[in-house]
Amino acid sequence: MSPTPEVPANSPFTLHNIPFGVISTSSNTTPRCASAIGDHAIDLGILFQKAEPDIMLGKPAPYQDFEQQTLNAFAGLPSGLRSNVRRFILDSLLNNTVPFEAFLPLDTVRMHMPMQISGYSDFFCSLEHCQNCSPMTGGNIPKNFYYSPSVYNGRASSVVVSPDPIRRPKGVMYDTGGKEGNPVYGASLKMDFELEMGFFVSKPVPWGQSLDIEKARDHIFGFVVLNDWSSRDLQAYEMTPLGPFHSKGFATSISPWIVTLEALEPFACEPKHNHDSTTFEHLRWHDRAKGTFDIRLTAKLIRNGITYDLVESNLRYMYWTPYQQIVHHAAGGCGLKTGDLLGTGTISGEKQGELGCLYEATRDGNSKLQFDDGSELGYLEDGDEIILEAWCGDGEGGRATIGFGHSRGKLLPSI
Amino acid sequence: MSPTPEVPANSPFTLHNIPFGVISTSSNTTPRCASAIGDHAIDLGILFQKAEPDIMLGKPAPYQDFEQQTLNAFAGLPSGLRSNVRRFILDSLLNNTVPFEAFLPLDTVRMHMPMQISGYSDFFCSLEHCQNCSPMTGGNIPKNFYYSPSVYNGRASSVVVSPDPIRRPKGVMYDTGGKEGNPVYGASLKMDFELEMGFFVSKPVPWGQSLDIEKARDHIFGFVVLNDWSSRDLQAYEMTPLGPFHSKGFATSISPWIVTLEALEPFACEPKHNHDSTTFEHLRWHDRAKGTFDIRLTAKLIRNGITYDLVESNLRYMYWTPYQQIVHHAAGGCGLKTGDLLGTGTISGEKQGELGCLYEATRDGNSKLQFDDGSELGYLEDGDEIILEAWCGDGEGGRATIGFGHSRGKLLPSI
């Protein structure tokens, strides 16, 4: 047993968090499940293997689930059992009963993809983002935006975990970079990021069945920060009629630590947009005051060693909430599996500094961002690094603070 | 050892075929890999376990691969080794050296999903289909259709194997069933099928890499018949701007036996459309005369016990070929995994009887099909069953014949 390490003031991984991830170390390169506290990972296989049988908390024993190379087995457990497990981790930290060897300094662990992702879908649910993207989607806000969360299937094979670098894609585009012109094949010239969150499915929804919104909570394991890397010239070429494919499919980055729905519930809040009066009953949340979450999001750019602030936004700005998204997704009967990833879509606000991607912030590159040091930014250049971050609470007056850590990724040149 | 059963004249599973599938039986309910000859499945675990070590044909031993519950391990082997395995099965049949207990009458086996599908993408590559669908996609043929194979990500979680029934989905649509109107939520009223083929990825393409068309052959395991069940009212609602989601995601049916690329190569032929002069070099096939395959496709409807012929089409009608499709798919760097499924898109010809879905054949239900018995057909009704079938060769003059068997599925009412 070991005294629980102190949590540094700026750590996202406070006692209020208890996130879940998958780690390996140089001395044990097999990926395995972990939590985090302050600057340390907690090897959950070790913690639960040393736990007394009477706190094994159910069958199958969590320590076996935590010796898996992904969190899918754990995420698939009933929410009550997952909650007990999280409580046991917290109690072990509070009681200083975590075995010494379970603590691993975060700067010595390698983070792995936390879940085996069978399906990845991405939404288009920020009204401000939709407004600003209308030149790309037909000139105005599609009518269907207001009646159900818009969504497309993404590419699960190219979801990567921070800080994996990503590569500038090749593809077919028009030589204008827009929706008209002569088709050419080559490396994208309009590389963008998108500031999103993602959430993982816990309890599956069987094929052919839908999901009652009152039960949506049981089907959400937790959230990550998500960068939906985008190529705007490939997108302009391919968007009509089938939607995004190559323009999004080359890479999606997520932060490595999954913050559970339970940890986020103290930060439940009212969504910015109130459209209950026009919302279908199956998409209406029973308690508007807790319909979404107050999660502050930022995007930064590192170019030539200098960090530039790009965006400040908030999950509560979304027109459609995560609960509404998962219910709409399931409504058609496609089925949801444990480990499916749902992207919220770009999260933009009304102000210039709240626009969640460069397409919006620069008007498709036509109005470059100007920085205090005299530099300017249109689209991304090779070597640029994007860092997304998310926080809940402010810690002031003893209030809880939890964070997600980073989703960061560097843009490598095309090959 | 046992004499090889005679192959009935009308069997798709001739000695020229040697398809691969996954079966179980009432006496052994564990799914396992099989081939088929005439009216019999061949349990490949048994065949290869009894084979002499010197014909084990590589490591890992194929019999271990064939004891898996999917064909992914086998499909991931190098194409030369897969070819040797197929040759060994054929020789065993020709030499009457298949163990008696490996033969299982097809009417006693249950067919399972042959591959674990990590990603499913569906193309839109028939010029005739694209023309006929233009009311749904914006009124004319999108310019990008002519320059690269159009494609979207489908839903891997809802790919099912024939003869699994499918269920009429619910969703949001306009009360007109078209692209305008008042949004309503309910069961789709415009249920359609789409006559397609699908092909499975063998050798993976790593994330971030593209695929040379000269090497495309090594990455295709084999083909199935595929029904891209579609809901036209959900599709009209959701198509702009993100493309198909609920309208396709509720179910996709495939035939259970995978016919290998090698078995299809004797039926290689010239595509109907010649657009080499405007095709990007990375999509140009070296030998136009063998650029695609002569595969005859049919669709039938069973309603109230009566079978109606709906469509006769051919894979060679496609504007973009499977080789071009997989190369385009990989070009963006999304990665392809063993077991990924690529749908060719609806395969239509020029004539009324060659239109591969009811949207086309009935002009969105406005011009119902009239049958000789006086009945007519708009969209599908609950209880309707669609049977897709595919054949190569005609068997005349001693020429080879191979077939795919059926993809069949019954439409169950919405719940």
Image (cartoon, coloured by chain):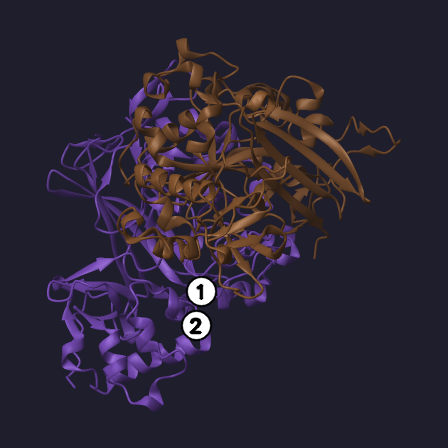
Chain colours: A brown, B purple
**Circle 1/circle 2 CB separation < 8 Å:** yes
- Residue A191 lies in what quarter of the image? top right
Instruction: State the image coordinates of residue B371 (x, y, percent, origin top left).
Output: 20, 36
Residue A57 in the image, given as x and y percentages of width and height = 29, 46
Name the residue located 35 percent from the left edge and 26 percent from the top edge: B233
Q: Which residue is drawn at 73% across and 42% down?
A: A189
| Figure disc tally | 2
**Residue count near mark 2 (Cα–Cα under 10 Å), binned few <14, some 14–19, many ≥20:** many
The amino acid sitting under disc 2 is Leu
Which residue is denoted by mark 1 in the rendering?
Answer: B202
Distance from disc 1 to disc 2, alpha carbons, whole Å, reads: 8 Å
Compared across the picture, whether B71 is left or right of A360 comes to left
Q: Quadrant of the C terminus of chain A?
A: bottom right
Residue B49 appears in the rendering: yes
User: Which residue is rendered at x = 36% and y = 79% of the image?
Assistant: B61
| Drawn side of residue B132 relative to residue A391, left or right | left
The chain carrying label 1 is B
Instruction: Tell which of A169 and A161 is nearer to you.
Output: A161
Residue B2, by quadrant, is bottom left
Three-letter amino acid code of the residue under disc 1 = Ser
In depth, the one of A30 and A130 nearer the eye is A30
Check the image and report above or below for B173 versus A5: above
Residue B231 visible, this angle: no
Q: In which quarter of the image is residue A217?
A: top left
- Describe the element under mark 1 as helix, strand or loop: loop
Residue B77 disc label: 2
